Amino acid sequence: MKNVKVYSTPTCPYCIRVKKFLEENNVPFENFDVSADQQKSEEMVKLSGQMGVPVLDIEGKIIVGFDKEAIKKELGI
């Protein structure tokens, strides 16, 4: 299984959807609440060049937003 990190906020509807999608597909992931963790927020911006959430880091491949097809392709599901 690939290492998956999700940078999100608790109120973002797309963040909620991406985490639900990963859970439904039995994909373990580490979630970082960038609204509460300034260091992770800065890390997310460095990785993606974006301020918006969600941002996924799948083994170093950065996906911005809930792009279901890109996520499925990267995870091989």
Image (cartoon, grey):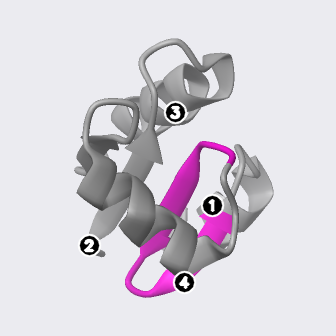
Q: Residue at x 59, y 24 (%)?
A: 17
- Pointer 2 residue: 3
- Measure the C-alpha gap from mark 3 to mark 2: 16 Å
- Pointer 4 residue: 61
- Measure the C-alpha gap from mark 3 to mark 1: 10 Å
> Could you say which disc has been placed on residue 62 in the image?
none
- Pointer 3 residue: 21
Instruction: Tell me the element at label 3.
Output: helix
- Pointer 1 residue: 72
Q: Is residue 35 left or right of residue 46?
A: left
* Disc on the earlier residue, 4 or 2: 2
For label 2, the crowd category at 10 Å Cα-Cα, with few meaning under 14, some 14 to 19 and many 20 or more, is: few
* Disc on the earlier residue, 3 or 2: 2
15 within the magenta span: no
Q: Badges 4 and 3: C-beta atoms under 8 Å apart?
A: no
Q: Is residue 40 visible?
A: yes
Residue 76 in the image: state x and y as whole percent. 53, 73
* Disc on the earlier residue, 4 or 3: 3
Q: Residue at x 70, y 62 (%)?
A: 50
Instruction: Tell me the element at label 1.
Output: helix
Q: Label 1 sits on what residue type?
A: Lys
- Measure the C-alpha gap from mark 4 to mark 3: 18 Å
Q: Quarter of the image containing the N terminus?
A: bottom left
Residue segment shown in magenta: 52-63
Instruction: Tell me the element at label 2.
Output: loop
